[in-house]
Image (cartoon, rainbow, N blue to C red):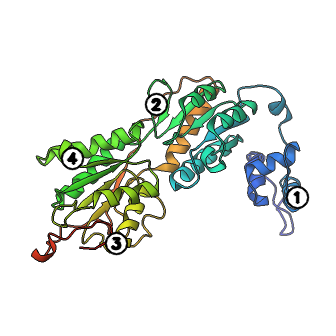
Amino acid sequence: MPKSKGDAPRKSLTAKPARRPTMKDVAKRAAVSLSTVSYVLNDSGPVAADRKARVLDAVRALGYMPNETARNLKRKSVATIGLVVPDLVNQFFAMVAEGVEQAAAERDVLVVFCAPEASGDSESWNSRLLRSQRLDGLIYLSGANSRMQSLVELIQVGPVVLVDEKLHGFNLPCVVSQNRQGAREIAEHLTSLGHRRLAILGGPTELWTAEQRLSGYREAIAAVGMNPDAVPFFAGDYRMESGERLAAEALRGPAGERPTALICANDLMAIGAMSYCRKVGLDVPGDVSIVGFDDLPISSLLYPSLTTVRQPARELGFEAAKLLLSLIDGAEAAPPLPARVTLMIRESSGPIVALPLNMRRGALGGISCP
C-alpha cells in the first residue's frame, strides 16, 4: 500500500541503540567538573546549591543512570585514580593533567588531584591522604623536591605510572618523551648560529629529565669540537626564579667574554633568564640568545617569543592514564615508545652580533649594562 504524505517515517529496526550517557556528559551539560558530579551523585562532598541544581537537571535531561553494581562491587572496571603533580605554576603539569583527565573520562574514571607544593602540605601528608581514598592506581610527576619515602608510601596504593621521569631505585613503568634528542637539537641550533660561548642553566641534577637534557646538550657541543666540560653549568630547579638568579651569575663579566647564548633546561627557567636580561638592559637575542624546553602555551606569546623544544604534554598524560588503566585491569601493558619532540625556532635565538671594540671590555656586575 503506497505511503501517504502524512505518514510518519518508520524507524529502522536495525538502528543502533543510543549511547548510554556518562558522567562526562553530565559534567559537560552542567558546566562543572567530574568531581563535582561525583560529589552530588554520591553525596560525598560539599557542592554549592546552584551547581548541585545544574547537575541534577543534567542527570534528568540526559537520563543518566549510575551503574550501582559497578560502583559497589570491586570489578575490573576502575572507579578512581590519583594524580600527583609538584605544583600548579608550571603549565606543563596542567597540560599533562588535561591528558590524564581526558583518558579517565572516556572510561568514567574519577581523578583525585594532588599538588603538594601548591597546597603547602608535605608529600608525606598527601601520600597518606591518597592511600585513604582507596585508589585503584596512581600517576606521579616528580619535582625538584620530591621525596622518595613518599613514593614508597604511594606505591602501596596500587599500580604507579611515572610521567616524563624515571626514578633511580624504582622499577616503575613510565611515559616519557625524547628529552635527550630534543636537547641535542636545540643545542645544535645554537651552534649552527655560530655560538661558542655557551652556558647551561640546568635542571635538578638528581632528576632523570635533567640528566637526559644535559647529555643532549653536551653531545651537540662536542660535535662542533668544543670541550663540553669547559662550558659553564649552573644547576637550577626548573623554576622561573632559579632561571633569573642563574642568568645573573652566568652573564657576569666583560661583554666580550660572557656567554652569547643561555641553554635553559625548561621554559620557566628561560623566562626567568629573559626577565633578568630585560631588567639589566640586555637585548634578547641581540646580546644573548636564550632557549628553553617544553613549549608552554605562554612561550609563543612572549616578546621575544621563545625558541624551545615542544613536548606533547597532553599526549604524555593521556598515554600514562591509558597505561595505568590497563595495568589496573590486569593486562601486561608495556610503556609506549618515547614521544617525539619538536624544535620550535622563534625570536629569542639568533646569530652572534659583533660588538664594537669600545664595548668588549664592559662588565655586567649587576649594576652597569654593556
In which quadrant will I find the C terminus? bottom left
Residues under labels 2 and 3: Cα distance?
Answer: 39 Å
| Secondary element type, mark 4 | helix
Image height check: is 98 above or below 108? below
| Observer-nearest of 106 and 317 | 317
| Secondary element type, mark 3 | helix
Q: Who comes first in sequence, dot 3 or dot 4?
A: 4
Q: Position of residue 215 (x, y in %)?
A: 28, 40
**Identity of the residue drawn at 67% across and 45% down:** 105
Asked which quadrant contains residue 229, the reply is top left
Asked which quadrant contains residue 228, the reply is top left
Q: Are marks 1 and 4 in contact (CB under 8 Å)?
A: no
Between marks 1 and 4 in the image, the one whose residue lies nearer the viewer: 4
Q: Residues within 10 Å of mark 2 (few under 14, many from 20)?
A: some
Asked which quadrant contains residue 219, the reply is top left
Q: Who comes first in sequence, dot 1 or dot 2?
A: 1
Q: Which residue is mark 3?
A: 280
Specify the amino acid type for callout 4.
Answer: Ala
**Identity of the residue drawn at 52% across and 54% down:** 90
Q: Who comes first in sequence, dot 2 or dot 4?
A: 2
Q: Who comes first in sequence, dot 3 or dot 1?
A: 1
Q: Are marks 3 and 1 in contact (CB under 8 Å)?
A: no
* Image mark for residue 167: 2
Q: Who comes first in sequence, dot 2 or dot 3?
A: 2
Q: Residues within 10 Å of mark 1 (few under 14, many from 20)?
A: some
| Secondary element type, mark 2 | loop
Q: Who comes first in sequence, dot 1 or dot 4?
A: 1
